[in-house]
Amino acid sequence: MVFDGDCPLCRRSVHAIVAHEAWTMTGLVTLQSALGHQLGDHFGEDAEDLDSMWLIRDGALYRDSDGLWRTAQSLTPPWSAAAGLRWLPVPLRDGCYRMVGRYRKKLATDPGMGGAVQSRLLTRLTRAQCDRLSLPATLAET
């Protein structure tokens, strides 16, 4: 998952995801990091936009509400029920996602980047991580 590391709501959300994940994600990356920019370049996304979280799975990048409901699939019940968002029309769920995103820096207190989140931040990808994410090995730092 790639997220805005300067956003209090984003950090709080990542803390919640880490606390309730049913299986361990490959890693966490901030949009501001060199790796966030490298992944953005690979997928033709601008990491400087800071307007969406990205979920990378099976060689594809999912953003906005598509990334949100797919992330929910990896959570324990009852949090995994949020994956039901996929049944809502895309314009509705993306519109809600963007509205929350517009005010995201005011919607939550800042939990910081400590604990479990800090320990899972990636600065580079290994070949094994690229394989697990179905990404080209050229993205791995040699």
Image: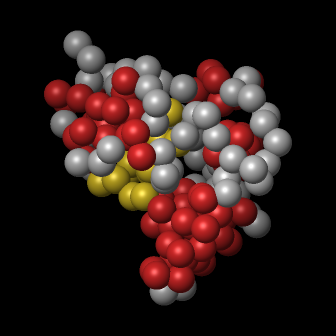
Number of dots carrying numbers: 0
Horizontal side, residue 36 vs residue 137: left or right: right
Relative horizontal placement of residue 46, taking residue 121 as reference (left or right): left
- Kindly identify the residue that appears in the image at 55 percent across and 65 percent down: 98
Q: Farthest residue toward the right?
A: 109
Q: Is residue 76 left or right of residue 3?
A: right
In percent of width and height, residue 32 lies at 46, 30
Q: Is residue 32 above or below residue 108?
A: above
Residue visible at 73% across and 23% down in the picture: 114
Q: Nearer the viewer, residue 9 or 73?
A: 9
Q: Is residue 10 visible?
A: yes
User: Would residue 30 be found to the left or right of residue 131 on screen?
Assistant: right
Residue 115 vs 64, above or below: the answer is above
Q: Is there any visible trace of residue 133 in the rendered image?
A: no
Q: Quadrant of the C terminus?
A: top left
Image coordinates for residue 34, horizontal then vertical, percent: 37, 24
Residue 9, position as x, y percentages in the image:
70, 47
Please provide percent x and percent y for residue 71: 54, 57
- Where, by quadrant of the figure, is residue 116 drawn? top right
Residue at x 53% of width, y 75% of height: 95
List the single residue furthest toward the top.
142
